[in-house]
Amino acid sequence: MRLFKGLLAAAALSMVALAASAAEYKSEYKVSTVVGKPFPWGLSAERWAELVEERTDGRIKMKVYPGAQLVQGDQTKEFTAIRQGIIDMAVGSTINWSPQVKELNLFSLPFLMPDYEAIDALTQGEVGQAIFEAIDAKGVLPLAWSENGFRELSNSKHPVRTPEDLAGLKIRVVGSPLYNDTFTALGANPTQMSWADAQPALSTGAVDGQENPMAIYGAAKLYTLGQTHLTMWRYVADPLVMAVSKRVWETFTPEDQAIVREAAVEAGRYGVELAREGLTGENPAYLEELRGLGVEVVEPTAEERAKFVAATRPVYEAWKEKIGAELVEKAEQAIGK
Ligand code: X2X
């Protein structure tokens, strides 16, 4: 009898524990992105949410809020908002989080990564691990990588093949001072603004050009905003980080943590695939499609590219120190320079 009572008490206790942990779950988890569907970025966030809801039998419901709306469109505030608990989860750009995590500027070093293998060598290796540790140390838990893509240059004025062609062009750049330095070194006139402000600025001609991955250029139809000169120079790439607030993470059971993490890895891989579609050696269909829409696509020769590299080298060297020479050297080695 005594044993039976004891068992009952234990059962009651564990039910209380279960109820307590379930009660801590929110009815909805807010996932921040800068762009939503049909951009690969938004699609990988949606995939993450779908996988998690399905595999937790609805215990965890994630909702994607695109347009950086949870931070009133100011994408450079996203990281801080996750840390403060205003945002639960995010698929965020290395550029937008670089004001808070200086190591993330690595991917914006001009002409560090020549090809997709180089991006993978960084994100999937020791360097990626070191960067995840840096994000973690700043109070946000990174779970997986996704991808925005190589950032290519477009403008409404004329073909750009060398730095001389950029002289005086007003170019919208993103919110890391490294971009100001790079475009200043190239002789252009950079002006920083959010993605929300960039589109109207392009359509009114307030700026002449911009730089963004093809996935963004195509889905936002920037060629309809006069951006018909494209330069495929692969000067920087922008991986995305799938991350969760530490406060939220701590409320999840170990089982649910494993599900959320695994789903992030899968959805991240899907995002990488989508971001590269039609842009690889085996499948260059994207550029053909754009040419068909009247876009003039410039693919700089090795000689022309070398001029961009030379002009931006002092910026690379200066930022190597700011980011941390050791990390940058590790990255150079991983890429096999
Ligand atoms: O603002 C941009 O250019 C974008 C959409 O690519 C980022 O958020 C980094």
Image (spheres, helix red, strand yellow):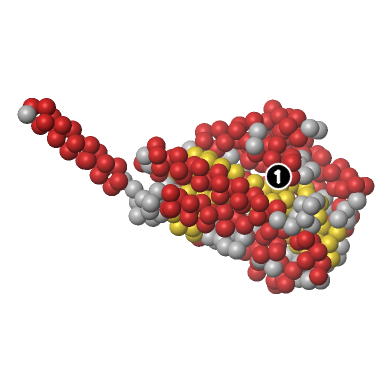
Q: Amino acid at mark 1?
A: Ser
Percent position of residue 160, x then y: 86, 59
Few, some or many residues within 10 Å of mark 1 (<14, 14–19, 20+): many
Point 66% across, 51% down: residue:
273
Point 82% across, 40% down: residue:
313
Q: Nearer the viewer, residue 128 or 15?
A: 15
Name the quadrant of the N terminus. Answer: top left
Percent position of residue 252, x then y: 38, 41
The quarter of the picture where residue 245 lies is: top left
Percent position of residue 234, x then y: 78, 49
Query: Would you name the residue on which mark 1 appears?
Result: 108
Say above or below: 102 vs 88. Answer: above
In the rendered picture of this protein, how many numbered marks are placed on residues? 1
Q: Taking 315 as reference, is 16 left or right?
A: left
Residue 45: tell me if it is visible. yes
Residue placed farthest to the left in the image?
1
Q: Taking 154 as reference, is 87 left or right?
A: left
| Label 1 within 8 A of ligand 1 by Cβ | no
Point 56% across, 61% down: residue:
36
Q: Taking 84 as reference, is 192 left or right?
A: right
Q: Nearer the viewer, residue 245 or 263?
A: 263
Point 82% across, 67% down: residue:
291
Q: Taking 307 as reference, is 125 left or right?
A: left
Name the quadrant of the C terminus. Answer: top right
Residue 96: tell me if it is visible. no
Percent position of residue 3, x then y: 11, 27
Dot 1: element: helix
Q: Nearer the viewer, residue 95 or 281?
A: 281
The quarter of the picture where residue 101 lies is: top right
